[in-house]
Amino acid sequence: MKILLADDDSIMHRILAHQLGREGISVESAYNGREALEMAERSRPDLLILDGMMPELDGFAVLREWKARESLRNIPVVMLTARNREGDVVGALGEGAVDYLTKPFSPAELIARVKRLMCSDGVENP
């Protein structure tokens, strides 16, 4: 399985790449919203983990654009963001995110949720 992680925090990338890599999951990194969309068009990840607050194009705008593109709309999106207002959560889920976790978060919980999504999407668990 290949995950695209879109977050402007390089430490977050290192932590998640290490934790997910231990589970046999490959992680590609994008550091802003525009880069995430461009990379996804080229590499077609199995899942996008998306921060809500990034430069260039925030995660909520990326989510809307992601779901508007026929080539990407069927790739699931998990929001992983510090934005924890009810309106943010409900809005993202309403726009098509399959899950929403707030920072700070437990990497073990994120991995469990990713594995659940892998099973429900018919992707073999590593």
Image (tube, rainbow, N blue to C red):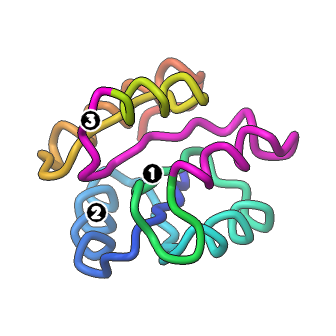
Is residue 70 or residue 52 the one in the foreground? Answer: 52
- How far across and down, in percent of the image, does residue 61 sit? 61, 52
| Mark drawn on residue 49 | 1
Q: Is residue 121 above or below residue 78?
A: above
What residue appears at the point 69 percent right and 70 percent down from the top-left corner? Answer: 39
- Residue, disc 3: 85
**What range is drawn magenta here?**
60-86
N-terminal of the pair, mark 1 or mark 2, is: 2
What residue appears at the point 26 percent right and 70 percent down from the top-left corner? Answer: 12
N-terminal of the pair, mark 2 or mark 3, is: 2
- Residue, disc 2: 16
- Asked which secondary structure carries label 3, the reply is loop
Is residue 49 or residue 54 the one in the foreground? Answer: 54
Marks 1 and 3 close (CB-CB < 8 Å): no
Q: How much space separates mark 2 and mark 3, taking CA atoms?
A: 24 Å
- Asked which secondary structure carries label 1, the reply is strand
In the visual, does 71 lie left or right of 116? right
In the visual, does 10 lie left or right of 48? left
Q: Label 3 sits on what residue type?
A: Arg
Between label 2 and label 3, give the one nearer the viewer. 3
What residue appears at the point 58 percent right and 36 percent down from the top-left corner? Answer: 76
